[in-house]
Amino acid sequence: MKKRTKWWVMLAIVVLLLAGTVFDYYRSQTVSIEVVSVSPETVVADSSIPVDITLRVTKRGKLAVGDDIAALVEGKGSMSANKSRVDENGLVTFRYYPYNYLEGINEAGTVTLVFRDISDSVFIGIPKRIRVDLDVEEPETLGGDTMDSLFGE
């Protein structure tokens, strides 16, 4: 009898976890995150020239005012904040600081930024995500550090 009760309890837990996962997945599909602007449009490998990325967040077609959006840099560079709140216009802006160009070490390439709505998941944690690829270009003038200036010739 006890063995049968244990199986029913385990089955109930699995069913509840599965139901929570389906619920969170469905909720994540009702959220839309879109890029409104990237300023400046040309991203240069220079941390003194930050890039502002503005996103519009909607939920079921309405502005997602008050939702928290998290940001993650996959690659080099950093964000001014890793979390920000959607304003009354449904917009949220993040500032990305590119890495500094250093020939042979930090060269031009693509950096991926991941944004996710962390306010919407209830049970399991399945947030809506958007990936933004930024093509980071070499600066026109190399006024910063070089391998020779760091370590000598």
Image (cartoon, rainbow, N blue to C red):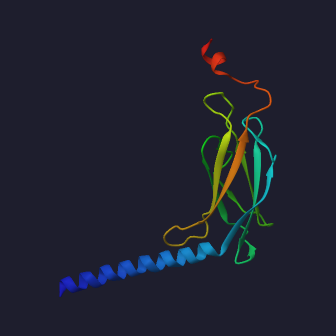
Q: Residue at the spot x=48%, y=70% of the render?
A: 124
Q: Where is residue 110 in the image (x, y as percent from the top left)?
A: 66, 45
Residue located 24% across and 85% down the image: 5
Q: Residue 127 versus residue 120: which sits nearer the camera?
A: 127
Tally of numbered discs: 0
Percent from the top left, x then y, of residue 142?
Answer: 75, 25
Residue occupying the far top of the picture? 153
Q: Relative to residue 24, is residue 145 drawn left or right?
A: right
Please state the horizontal and vertical placement of residue 107, each as a whole percent of the image: 66, 34
Examine the image and state in which quarter residue 67 appears.
bottom right
Residue 114 percent across, percent down from the top left: 63, 55
Toward which corner of the image does residue 37 lie, by quadrant? bottom right
Q: Nearer the viewer, residue 118 or 116?
A: 116
Q: Is residue 93 above or below residue 31?
A: above
Q: Quadrant of the N terminus?
A: bottom left
**Quadrant the C terminus occupies:** top right
Q: In this view, does 146 lie to the left or right of 122?
A: right
Q: Where, by quadrant of the figure, is residue 146 drawn?
A: top right
Q: Residue at x 60, y 64 (%)?
A: 118
**Residue 104 relative to residue 53: left or right:** left
Q: Is residue 138 above or below residue 145?
A: below
Residue at the bottom extreme?
A: 1
